[in-house]
Amino acid sequence: MRAPWRREPQLAPWPVVLRDRSAEPEVVLRPLRLKDEDEWHHLRRENADHVRPWEPTLPPGVTTRLPVSYRQFVSDLDREAAADRAMPWCIEVGGRIVGQVHLFGIVRAAQQSAAAGYWLAESESGQGIATRALAMAIDHALGPAGLHRVEVNIRLDNDRSLALVRRLRLREEGVRERYLHIDGSWRDHLSFAVTAEEVERAGLASRLSHL
């Protein structure tokens, strides 16, 4: 018999599709699908140099199992989402994939937190797409997904991403020295966070309407 004080773990619903029609272009967050393979590979090739300075790398001596195929990559994402450890979306605009935004490192129990990260195609920069996508993901996390806190950690020299989180008025929490191994070295990151109590009822998206 289950102890009366023990609750079943809360799992966020998945798969989830989110849409923002508040401005043009419409931004859609949806899970990556097997049929996206050619489009996803093309997008990654086109943006390899653009994203390389900001993407995690493995430090010397550390190995991990890498997906051997796109099919395995999508399967791994779906498995992490089903286990409530991540919420991985691709960003779609006008029926085209233009990037990805993930909630990852989800912790339940007393913490109820996650981190968020994203990347966007260079050709789509400057339109507010990444800002809206991150706002949508965090609003979902702090609302339907039942989380209490989301953090975003950004390299100190990533000016565009720093401007993005400041547009959303996320709270700055300070520098984490040598926090992540990025582009071949341990890099300092500036940490930002937001909790459910800090977000207006309309969510982070409402802050964009006042810009």
Image: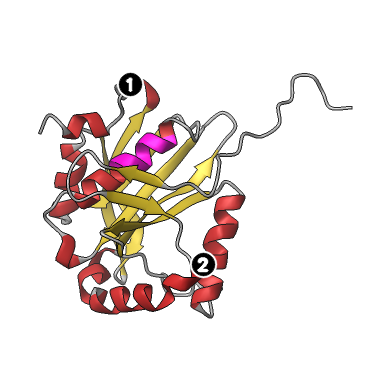
Position of 107 compared to 117: left or right? Answer: right
Q: Nearer the viewer, residue 177 or 34?
A: 34
Question: Which image quarter: residue 50?
Answer: bottom left
As helix, strand or loop, the secondary structure at mark 2 comes to: helix
Most distant residue in the right direction: 1
Position of 78 compared to 5: left or right? Answer: left
Residue 178 seen from this side: yes
Q: Nearer the viewer, residue 134 or 105?
A: 134
Give the percent coordinates (x, y) of residue 121.
23, 65
Disc 2 versus disc 1: distance between alpha carbons?
Answer: 33 Å
The magenta span reads 135-141
Give the percent coordinates (x, y) of residue 209.
15, 32
Q: Which residue is labeled 2 in the image? A: 74
Q: Residue at x 52, y 79 (%)?
A: 69
Crowding at dot 1, Cα within 10 Å, few <14 / some 14-19 / many 20+, comes out as few
- Type of residue at label 1? Arg
Quadrant placement of the C terminus:
top left
Quadrant placement of the N terminus:
top right
Q: Which residue is labeled 1 in the image? A: 201
Residue 159 in the image: above or below residue 205:
below
Marked residue nearer the N-terminal end (2 or 1): 2
Q: Are marks 2 and 1 in contact (CB under 8 Å)?
A: no
Question: Which image quarter: residue 109?
Answer: top right
Give the percent coordinates (x, y) of residue 135.
29, 40
